[in-house]
Image: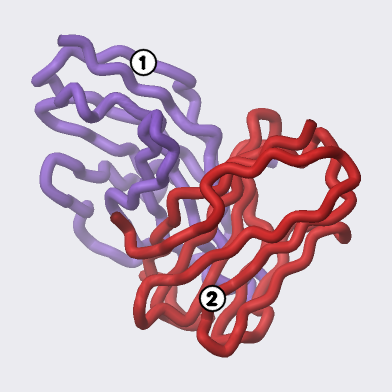
Chain colours: A red, B purple
Amino acid sequence: DSGVTQTPKHLITATGQRVTLRCSPRSGDLSVYWYQQSLDQGLQFLIQYYNGEERAKGNILERFSAQQFPDLHSELNLSSLELGDSALYFCASSVAGPAGLTDTQYFGPGTRLTVL
Amino acid sequence: AQKITQTQPGMFVQEKEAVTLDCTYDTSDPSYGLFWYKQPSSGEMIFLIYQGSYDQQNATEGRYSLNFQKARKSANLVISASQLGDSAMYFCAMRERTIKAAGNKLTFGGGTRVLVKP
């Protein structure tokens, strides 16, 4: 158990809908990351938050948004869902801030999203 | 261009034998970190081992070790004395330090599936 929790574990929804994925980082970790794992794209970085502020953005679609709350939990909102958004969405957390090269990211169990 | 390349899509290994998983990387950043993660069929991503670009020695962590060849830009994972529970996907990942806009993001390779045979 990495100490990172994600809910829900599975999500099945229809095209055009909006969903929210939730993540609680390990105790003491200030950074939260979101990754998407799909068969065609592999594991892709979406976005990073550090202590409530957006730190880095990857290939995140405009239909997707995220935030990190004062208690450091994070939510990833996916809207106007398309079939191609079906994937495993991981949240990861780490201790250090932007300068932490050796800082290890620990992953949650993931949320498997199926868009029908 | 691919930043992280794992050329072996899948491999079999006999239980109790060692296996080497290849990873080559591409970066112009002098400061970077390399990570290996394991993803069993249950889906979670498990951190295995880390190697920093300035580390003088190869990283080791239990049965896992890294064969780090900086000049060749390779960071191969060696799993010794394979066990049935080692059957999983293995991902190599890199973090580059100098690119501020990249934050602490990890760039992953395509993975290698390992199946341990009894």
- Residue at 28%, 28% (x, y): give it: B20
Residue B7 rendering spot, x and y as whole percentages: 49, 25
Tell us which disc is closer to us: 2 or 1: 2
Relative to residue B30, is residue A16 depicted above or below? above
**Do the residues at discs 2 and 1 belong to one chain?**
no
Circle 1 Cα neighbour tier, 10 Å, few/some/many (<14 / 14–19 / ≥20): some
Determine which quarter of the picture holds residue A12. top right
Residue B4 rendering spot, x and y as whole percentages: 54, 42
Q: Chain of mark 1?
A: B
Q: Quadrant of the C terminus of chain B?
A: top left
Nearest the viewer among B87 and A64 is: A64
Q: Chain of mark 2?
A: A
Give the amino acid at mark 1: Met
Query: Would residue B62 be seen by someone viewing this image from the given angle?
Result: yes
Residue wearing tag 1: B11
Residue A111 rendering spot, x and y as whole percentages: 56, 48
Circle 2 Cα neighbour tier, 10 Å, few/some/many (<14 / 14–19 / ≥20): many
Residue wearing tag 2: A73
Q: How many marks?
A: 2
Relative to residue B8, is residue A37 depicted above or below? below
Give the amino acid at mark 2: His
Question: SS for tag 2?
Answer: loop
Q: Quadrant of the N terminus of chain B?
A: top right
- Residue at 35%, 40% (x, y): give it: B38
B32 on left or right of B63: right
